[in-house]
Image: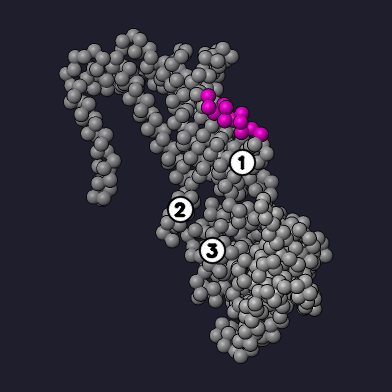
Amino acid sequence: MLEVNGVKKVYEGKSRTVEAVRNLTFTLGQGEFTCLVGPSGSGKTTLLKIMSGLLDPTEGEVLMEGKRVDGPPPGMAIVFQEYGRSLFPWMSIRDNVELPLKQKKVPAARRKELVDESLSAVGLADVHSAYPWQLSGGMQQRVAIARAIAYEPHVLLMDEPFAAVDAQTRADLEDLVRDLWHRYKMTVLFVTHDIDESVYLGQRVIILSSSPTVVREDLAIDLPDERDQLNTRGSARFNELRAQVYSQIHRPREEAVEAPSRDAGATSLAKQG
Amino acid sequence: MTGVLKRVGFLLGLPAVLFALWWTASAGSTDFYFPPLSRILESLVDEWFGPRLMDDVVPSLLRLAAGYLVAAVVGITLGVLIGTYKRLRDFLEPVLEFFRAIPPPVIVPILMLVFGIENTMKIVVIAFGCMWPILLNTAEGVRAVDSTQSETARVYRITGFARLRYLVLPSASPQIAAGLRQGLSVAIILMVISELFAASDGLGFAIVQAQRSFAIPEMWAGMIMLGLLGFLLSLLFRLVESRWLAWYHGLRKAQKAG
């Protein structure tokens, strides 16, 4: 579905070059819900931008449905962390959701259907004519999610979408994303720095090292598909998985960066997953 | 209700005081150059709101509108291009800085040679002078398009003309409006100046004419007329702007509150 092959990104500055991403290889299966977790500054956003064609990798390539990504591919939608800056404040909620569909040349009747359906799917059936800035942060992020699913993407990328909302809203939005994933069956990649969130949400967690980034571990989340905030997070298995992710992230730094063999090990692990 | 009254009182307080001061200080004045305000107002009503309205004020305003419109179209178009293409900006910048540094009134004599003293010359002077704030503000606004909004547009494949229409122009519109506002006051100044040199009608022409023929109250009244016009035009501009940029003022308010 979406393959990341040996992606490397080096930023060439005037006085120094920064290796943001060293070597990343993994594959997202059709309809799979994967979380990507890593410490802050681990090049997660860089990776996401490369996967979405917003940024070119220095080495390696990204394939979506077998085709090399060299610009935003048609079947992909992104939800950014900065909801306030991703929605267009000069347009109503409805127009924000509808604009990408207009560009996609979806006929008007179908557009209306998609906008209505996606807005009610995120629980915003009654605020169509409001402007984004009239809503709370959590509601604005719901609009951004509605815009993404109305686009009917095959792949949905989410870049720390809930980092800026309060805890209760965040829990609601997490459950919303899982619901939507069940309903629309698209491939989801959810980037986060929150360990609990990554374990709770996905079928699989890819753990990144700090920059220069390699894959530390590719962990299958064998929690039951039916999840809820109280029981899932309280279960023994959740805590084991959480501890595992935690220990990988907090493993001493030197160990991860010391030798190329270590990187190769991490990469091959990723390939198995 | 009392709140509204208070605000109106606050707004009109100073003008009323100044008016009263001028009125009493000039009442019964026999000085030829400083006639009583009552006489000035008489001439304002008789002359400026009389025959001169059609003969001088309207022609001035039409030229103002034409010059301003040309400046807006050219300024916004060039501003969008310069704000979008960095290479174009680097290429044009020295020339633009040079032309911008020329005080617009000095091009009047030159333009008189090329276009004569008729409307074309005046419209070009107005357009040339008030184009700069519009152009520069538009370029700034276009350059400052938010990176996340820009990436959002790319992801949803909103490119080319749609990007201009749905992202770039609305996003730059607060800056464009600021440029248009500055441009308007420059345009009014140039409207008068272009008529001072050589003209057969217009506000500037009529005021100079009045001064030269020692019609002093009429001269003063012309000045008041200009002040009133400028005030009304900026009021009109604010009204249009508050509708056009309602989203922006709402957004700013929400950000301040949050």
Which span is picked out in magenta?
B91-102
According to the image, what is the colour scheme of the structure?
one colour
Q: Which mark is residue B252?
A: 2
For the residues marked 3 and 2, what is the alpha-carbon distance in whole angstroms?
Answer: 16 Å
Disc 3 designates what residue?
A140
For the residues marked 1 and 2, what is the alpha-carbon distance in whole angstroms?
Answer: 24 Å
At 55% from the left edge and 36% from the top edge, which residue is drawn? B136
At 49% from the left edge and 58% from the top edge, which residue is drawn? A133
Query: Mark 3, mark 2: which one is toward the viewer?
Result: 2
Q: Nearer the viewer, residue B69 or A15?
A: A15
Is label 3 in contact with label 2 (beta carbons under 8 Å)?
no
Please report, as a chain letter, where disc 2 is located: B
Q: Amino acid at mark 2?
A: Arg
Q: Amino acid at mark 1?
A: Gly
Q: Are marks 1 and 2 on the same chain?
A: yes
The location of residue A135, given as percent across then percent down, is 49, 62
At 58% from the left edge and 49% from the top edge, which residue is drawn? B145
Q: Main secondary structure of the magenta part?
A: helix
In this rendering, does residue A226 appear at all?
no
Query: Mark 1, mark 3: which one is toward the viewer?
Result: 1
Left or right side of B118 for A253: right
Q: Nearer the viewer, residue A105 or B137?
A: B137
Look at the image and tell me in which quarter the N terminus of chain A lies.
bottom right
Q: Earlier in the sequence, mark 1 or mark 2?
A: 1
The location of residue B184, given as percent across then percent down, is 46, 32
At 41% from the left edge and 59% from the top edge, which residue is drawn? B257
Please report, as a chain letter, where disc 1 is located: B
